Amino acid sequence: MLKGLAITPPIIGRISIGRVVERQGKRLPEKDDAFTITTQIQQRGEWVLHPLHESLRKQSTGKLRAIPVRFLFNDPDLNLRAEYSCFDRETGRPVCVGDGETCRRAGDAGIEELPCPSPDGCAFGQAGACKPYGRLNALIGDEDEMGSFIFRTTSYNSIRTLAARLHYFAAVSGNLLACLPLELKLRGKSTTQSYRSAIYYVDLAVRAGSTLEDAIVQARELDARRKAAGFDQQALDTAAHAGFSNGAFEESIEDGGAVVDEFYSGSTTGELEDRPAAGTETPQASRPSLRDKLDRKATLLRSAAA
């Protein structure tokens, strides 16, 4: 195994809830209210849809807002890796990754281990360069049982929700997370940051039409069949942990370029989540200015005086 190179799960496609569009010569992230499943190939600056996207969309009543998935690993932290990450916006090279206590930072002297005060308290990561960054690997369909689709996100809502769900499902199933039939769901909410407009984040749930008890029964049956066939889930988790630990950074320069394009372009808060979808008018954009308020107040005073 090459030292310094993180060995990550094989990726055969991407999951996103938005896209990057070009406006006035700039590539900017644009939010959507549905999932998009793509290949890893781009044509004319856009990711090519994966055949699974259309087949799953046809099974729904409209937009693709739920994706049936399984996971590679029983350990929740192997399926979802979340860290504070800072990328060089010009090269796409990861330069600093931390967990809120310690970080690994690339410098002239190589990789350094330093304290990590989190983005709000870090001078190095000011101006939005450092963000929470999560990567979720999920299995879709049965074509490739070791090939996963990756969902990348800088959304606090998605990261927090997915982390909680993964740990909860692992706990209630008796550590059979890799055998549970689950689905990614797109949920909406309004927050003060979105000025009460709808924003979307990714959640994890039992598949529609099933119950948690049914899912656990199915997981136990699948686990029994795998053990009878000689499938060693614990060895797979151990191998994955060793692969992730082999490199200082999970993302390569090539991957980092895609991250910068999607999450950093044109804005310090360019996440595709935690912001209203495209075409949604935000109250911020329509709120009256201070001059409008003063003019309105003056008009009311004049009317009252008359």
Image (cartoon, rainbow, N blue to C red):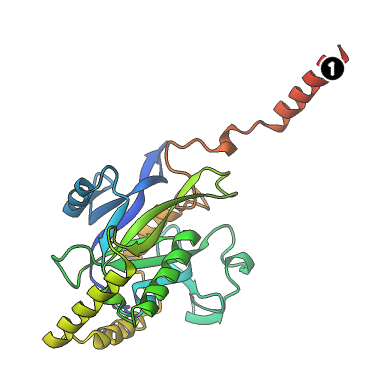
Establish if 44 lies above or below 11.
Answer: above
Label 1: how many Cα within 10 Å (few below 14, some 14–19, many 20+): few
Q: Secondary structure at mark 1?
A: helix
Q: Quadrant of the C terminus?
A: top right
**In the figure, residue 233 lies in which quadrant?**
bottom left
Residue under the point 27% across and 87% down: 234
Residue under the point 47% across and 51% down: 270
Taking depth in this image into account, of 142 and 81 the one nearest to the observer is 142
Q: Can the viewer see residue 8 in this picture?
A: no
Location of residue 8 in the rendering, given as x and y in whole percent from the top left corner: 29, 75
Residue that extends furthest to the top in the rendered view of this protein: 306
The residue indicated by pointer 1 is: 304
The number of callouts visible is 1
Taking depth in this image into account, of 185 and 26 the one nearest to the observer is 185
Q: Can the viewer see residue 167 in this picture?
A: yes
Q: Quadrant of the N terminus?
A: bottom left
Establish if 284 lies above or below 88.
Answer: above
Location of residue 197 in the rendering, given as x and y in whole percent from the top left corner: 52, 42
Taking depth in this image into account, of 10 and 111 the one nearest to the observer is 10
Q: The disc labelled 1 sits on which kind of residue?
A: Ala
For this view, does 232 lie left or right of residue 251?
left
For this view, does 106 lie left or right of residue 253?
right
Residue under the point 33% across and 69% down: 212
Residue that extends furthest to the right in the rendered view of this protein: 305
Location of residue 71 in the rendering, given as x and y in whole percent from the top left corner: 28, 71
Establish if 172 lies above or below 43.
Answer: below
**In the figure, residue 286 lies in which quadrant?**
top right
Location of residue 46 in the rendering, given as x and y in whole percent from the top left corner: 27, 47
